[in-house]
Image (cartoon, rainbow, N blue to C red):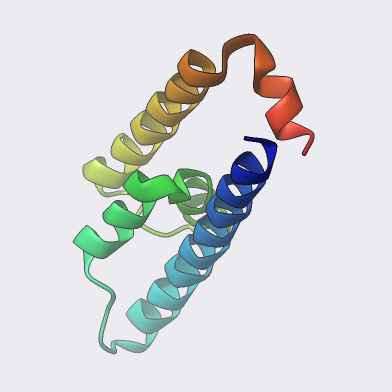
Amino acid sequence: METMAKYIIYLLLAINVITFILYGIDKLKAKKGKWRIPEATLLLLAVVGGSIGAWLGMKVWHHKTLHKKFRYGVPLILIAQFALCIYFFGENIQAYVCL
């Protein structure tokens, strides 16, 4: 189980890095008036595990902060994901975080 947990953590780390970068790319494209990444894609990345990257992308790039579905949706997704982690891993959460 420990090996599986490591893979899940690495996968979540990768999703969050990709999500953070895509928020930055979308902000840059918005400034230049070019093709944009669909909002549904950005939100979906948060839902599938990239909520930390999405939240950081919003803060660092100052992107999508005025859109209610992002301003409220991303933090709610993040809270829900933390709650699920606590529910599933409970007292063992420190062991998984320290992998």
From what the image shows, is residue 13 above or below residue 27?
above
Q: Quadrant of the C terminus?
A: top right
- The x, y position of residue 24, in whole percent, is 49, 70
Q: Which residue, as the protein is rendered here, is positioned at the far top? A: 91
Q: At 61% across and 51% down in the image, what residue appears?
A: 7
Q: At 27% across and 79% down in the image, what residue appears?
A: 36
Q: Which residue, as the protein is rendered here, is positioned at the far right? A: 98
- The x, y position of residue 64, in whole percent, is 35, 56
Q: Quick one: 63 or 16, which is closer to the camera?
A: 16
Q: Quick one: 62 or 15, which is closer to the camera?
A: 15
Residue 25 as seen in the image, left or right of residue 70: right
Give the quarter of the image for residue 26: bottom left
From what the image shows, is residue 15 above or below residue 95?
below
Q: Quadrant of the N terminus?
A: top right
Q: How many marks?
A: 0
Q: Which residue, as the protein is rendered here, is positioned at the far front? A: 1
Give the quarter of the image for residue 35: bottom left
- The x, y position of residue 22, in whole percent, is 44, 70
Q: At 44% across and 66% down in the image, what residue appears?
A: 23
